[in-house]
Amino acid sequence: MKLEFDPTADAAYFEISSAPVERTEEIESGINADYDAEGHLVGIEVLSVSKRNLSEALEEVA
């Protein structure tokens, strides 16, 4: 697992697998999920990171 953050783009990418991305689906506005050819999650992209309240989202996951 790898996390990349681009402060210029204000975007983060959580890489779960190094498999090639076959398709991307928008989960919600500004959050995209990448999947491989078998439908396994490869990574998640979060746009406008600085404008999001991620603490609430993290509480829901935990």
Image (cartoon, grey):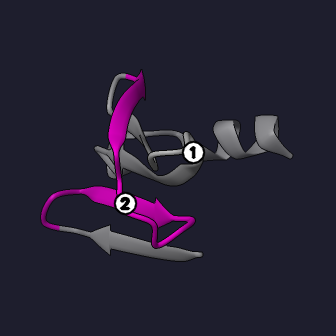
Which SS class for mark 2? strand
Left or right of 42? Residue 29 is left
Residue sitting at x 38%, y 47%: 46
The number of discs equals 2
Give the Cα distance between marks 1 and 2: 12 Å
Mark 2, residue position: 12
The dot on residue 54 is 1
Q: Which residues are magenta?
A: 8-28
Q: Residues within 10 Å of mark 2 (few under 14, many from 20)?
A: some
The dot on residue 11 is none
Given contact means CB atoms under 8 Å apart, are the residues at marks 1 and 2 in contact?
no
Left or right of 38? Residue 6 is left
Picture quadrant where residue 30 is located:
top left
Q: Amino acid under label 1? A: Leu
- Where residue 9 appears, as percent x and y from the top left, is 15, 58
Q: Nearer the viewer, residue 6 or 13?
A: 13
Q: Nearer the viewer, residue 20 or 42?
A: 20
Residue sitting at x 48%, y 66%: 15
Does residue 7 lie above or below 55 as drawn?
A: below
Image quadrant containing the N terminus? bottom right
